[in-house]
Image: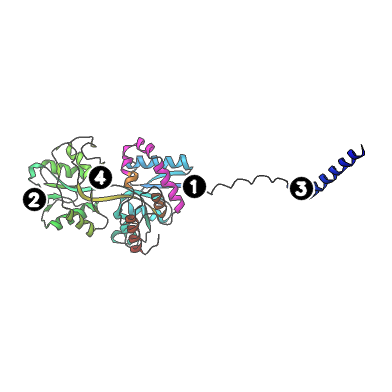
Amino acid sequence: MKKAIYLWLAVMFVSGLLLAACPAPTPSLPPAPPAPPPSQPKLPDSITWGQRSITGTSYVVSVATLRVWEETLGIKCFASEVASSLAAFPQMKEGKVDFWGPVTIRDGYLANNGMMEYEGAKCDLRVFFASQSTGQLFVALPRSGIKNMEDLNGKTTTYSSVRAVTMTEIGSALLEFYGLKVREIENLPMAEKHAALHDGSVDASLEGLPNIFQIWETDPDAYYIPISKEAGEYVASKYPWFTDEIMPPDWSIYKGNYVGPGPGLDYPVYCVGTPMVTYCPADMSEDVVYQLIKCMYDHSNELVAVHPYFSERALDKAVRPLSVPYHAGAIKYYKEVGLWTPEAEANQQKQLSNLGKSK
């Protein structure tokens, strides 16, 4: 019995020694709180998009975009009718208008460089996005006997316009390239141009080619007069706000895409292009521009459903070599979706260098 007691005491003694040698367990710590989400850029309370007119398809699509921004980003959005770029650009400098367009690239190029009607303007504009160019060529009817540009020599034309200066520039440059002399009827409004072509008062009219469907309503055999690549390049070299280009296969006037009076045009159409862009100030926040353009293109299907014209602003048309730099926030998005190429970056740096700017 004593031996059993001694053995039990020995076991308890050794166990005590072993327990004393073991460290006390460390109390468990509460789990670390989750990392806070990355801070989102502060968006403006409101956005104003200047429009040349508060009617028409461009206005409808722009207002639909503003509605998307309101509903998705919680920004109060407004559309404001502004008569022209001459009026809009000062309002952008004063912070009254945030976006302006789509309008021609010519306006922004001249304003940034303080040239011609924008002398002393001291603007610093950037491209938010580009839209489908407006192709420009002379249009004629079969009875004129005109088959090529050389046949215009000695004919009666209409291309010059005080209101549409780009028409005057393109028409005069094309005639200059081909060495042609014509009798010019100036400053005809569009309806009068088409009427003069119809009744034979003019032999050829310089047209933004989407307008040809209006001519087809009375003269479905009307056609455009082709130009050479060298002629297009000459116009673009004389006036850097124009491009020489082939209208893309999804262009609305091509056969297969076209719905309306007349036959449509055969692909490809090589022409002088007038790029259409929407501008924003260079000092607008990069993060804000990025959020706005991403939101717009994320909802492109909804916007096309509002009006098919949004396809003219489709993402595949947004990036192109232009004579005005893109905004850094837009570039960030275009890089993200794989549209910003080395060629686009080279042109961007060229345009910034011309302006003496870094971004």
Residue 24 is labelled as 3
* In this rendering, the label closer to the viewer, 1 or 2: 2
Q: Secondary structure at mark 2?
A: helix
Q: Amino acid at mark 2?
A: Asp
In which quadrant of the rendered view does residue 311 lie?
Answer: top left
Q: Secondary structure at mark 4?
A: loop
> Mark 4 to mark 2: distance in Å?
28 Å
* In this rendering, the label closer to the viewer, 4 or 3: 3
Residue range highlighted in magenta: 286-312
The chief SS type of the magenta part is helix
Residue that label 2 marks: 151
Residue that label 4 marks: 248
Q: Is residue 170 left or right of residue 318?
A: left
Q: Amino acid at mark 1?
A: Asp
Is the Cβ of the residue at disc 3 closer than 8 Å to that at disc 1? no
Mark toward the start of the polypeptide (1 vs 2):
1
Q: Is residue 217 left or right of residue 97?
A: left
Mark toward the start of the polypeptide (3 vs 1):
3
Q: Amino acid at mark 3?
A: Ala
The x and y percentages for residue 103 are 31, 49
In which quadrant of the rendered view does residue 218 lie?
Answer: top left
Quadrant of the snapshot with the N terminus: top right
Is the Cβ of the residue at disc 4 closer than 8 Å to that at disc 3? no
The x and y percentages for residue 208 are 22, 46
* In this rendering, the label closer to the viewer, 4 or 1: 4
Q: Amino acid at mark 4?
A: Pro
In reply to whether residue 299 is colored magenta, the answer given is yes
> Mark 4 to mark 1: distance in Å?
38 Å
Asked if 4 appears above or below 330 in the picture, the reply is above
Residue that label 1 marks: 45
Q: Is residue 244 left or right of residue 183?
A: right
